[in-house]
Image (spheres, coloured by chain):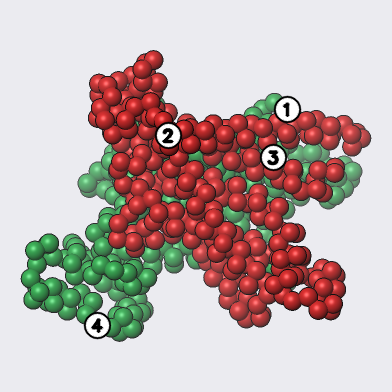
Chain colours: A green, B red
Amino acid sequence: MLLRLLPGDPANALLGVGATEQQIAAARAQVGSDQPLAVQFVSFLGNIARLDLGTSFVSRASVLEEIGNRMSVTLPLTFMGFFIALILAVPLGILAAVRSEKWYGTAISVISQLGIAIPVFWVGILLVTLFSINLRWLPSGGFPLKGWANFGEAITGMILPALTIGLVMGASLLRYVRAATLDVLGSDYLRTARALGASFPEALIRHGLRNGAVPVISILGIELASTFLGAVVIERVFSLPGLGSMLLLAIQQRDYPNVQGVLFISTLLVLLIGFAADIAQRLIDPRLRSTGSARE
Amino acid sequence: MTTEIITAPQRQRRPLILWAGLILVGLHVFAGLLSLIWLPYDPTAMAGGRLEGPSLLHWVGTDRLGRDLFTQMMIGSRIALTVGLGAVAIGAVIGVTLGILSAFATRWLDDALAATLDILIAFPTLLIAMLVVAASDTANLWSAIIALGIALSAIVARLTRILAKRVLVMDYITAARTSGSSWPKIVAIHILPNIWPTLAVNFALQFGLAVIAEASLSYLGLGAPPPNASWGRILQEAQGTVYTAPLGAIAPGIALVSLAIGVNLLADGLRDFIDPTRRAR
């Protein structure tokens, strides 16, 4: 809705430069931008409630359908990247904390510091240079027109983008896993467990995992949401037809229904992910269940 | 294990981090300032052949139009620093004001503000910036700076709110109130001096975030238009010619990362330097 308040009538986007006054008026009536803003807003809310996100100004396609098509690229990409990040960050983060005095423990945490200083698109470009151009192992971008019907091509097109997301996200996640593990290592309950005769790995798995997981999961929610929305940049690097490139194109074309639709669905997903992370935390930590969420 | 054994090497290590950060950032400040008065070549003119490799004449080669890449990278330093400073300044003014107001506000207003900030923070800086840029009709450097400043202000506001609330419950605030100090005076004398070290460190981190986000915006074509050579745009152009001239897609990235790491190191070093409780240890 915010976008509608801005200068630039969407009707102009429908027409070319040399449109007559009558054509503009007709276009305005057609897209509804001649109505007062309040009327536009109310009808927008009504449509949202019926899950009708309207049709694109530019392509005339149903926004919801288009989002569905794009999701088949963005969702698998997000989850593959997330999965790669997890299998990198959790073991390496724990290792970096447990062996923090060894050289490789330090090396892991120093390298993970790079994660917050490297733009994700540059990692993508570097990976393309290495794997597509020098080694010629994987395609440098693109997605088959038939989508997942052409499974082999689709999955090979996904590997590099997912790896890019996984590496960058994994690096920032690793820092949280390491910090959480260090907290657990310095805790009294771990010392007590060791004193009661549990071996070090046993104490860590039995008592440490649950305690360390709580702060990490709240970060996981934020990271998953930001990966999903951060797909905009990755999709551009690898020219993938996902939700991100849809949003970018819609912004450039002032295609408001598409912009609104993508934002609405993204917001919904971000809130859902946050909600899911909240529930997961409560399942793991019984203390959070009784007191409710304590906010500062 | 005595305390001395742990702290002695740390005291050594900390100034080292501060120095490393200062040197990295200093290099970019030098290149950026120098680019105002002197450049190796005219940034818009063909200075050599197309896509030349590195040589003594062109340290990192030339781009697809034959322009000197090192010249463009120097301008890139200037743009990155401008964006970082501008975005952090905007984010600081809006964020600190909102944060202080929220800390002083009535319960429901504070709750409403806090909830709004939480939702805003859940969205990546880049997405908010994209929308603000899209909203302003022509993309230019200032629209990117304002967009990033607004996006960062939510993070600053939340931090300020938490920090200010922590100070507000102190006994000396009660003492100041009973002795008749006005609220603006309490903010100026008690709250801001107490919270600024933590805020300053956070600003340094946000500077790095802003630089990376601007590069991403430019990469997506939503940043400063040509001939402003932002690192993101240089990288986007170089991506197409990465087969023949890989250095063009690598060198600006290294510049970008070195500045981002520099400000992060600076933040780490600064944290210990300005926080007396840590310094005393």
Q: Secondary structure beneath disc 4?
A: loop
Residue at mark 2 shares a chain with residue at mark 3 = yes
Number of marks drawn: 4
Q: CA distance from mark 1 to mark 3?
A: 23 Å
Q: Residue at 31% of width from left, 80% of height from top?
A: A37
Which one is in front in this view, the residue at disc 2 or the one at disc 3? 2
Tell which subunit mark 4 falls on: A
Instruction: Judge left or right: residue B3 versus residue B67.
Output: right
Which one is in front in this view, the residue at disc 4 or the one at disc 2? 2
Report the residue marked by disc 4.
A35
Q: Residue at 69% of width from left, 43% of height from top?
A: B270
Tell which subunit mark 2 falls on: B
Q: Secondary structure beneath disc 2?
A: helix
Q: CA distance from mark 3 to mark 4?
A: 57 Å
Residue A243, percent from left and from top? 34, 55
On screen, residue B43 above or below B212: above
Q: CA distance from mark 4 to mark 2?
A: 53 Å
Report the residue marked by disc 3.
B269
Q: Residue at 24% of width from left, 82% of height from top?
A: A35
Could you say which disc has been placed on residue B37 in the image?
2
Question: The disc labelled 3 sits on which kind of residue?
Answer: Gly
First in sequence: mark 2 or mark 3? 2
Quadrant the N terminus of chain A occupies: bottom left
Q: Quadrant of residue B11?
A: top right
Q: Is residue A80 visible?
A: no
First in sequence: mark 1 or mark 4? 4
Report the residue marked by disc 1.
A102
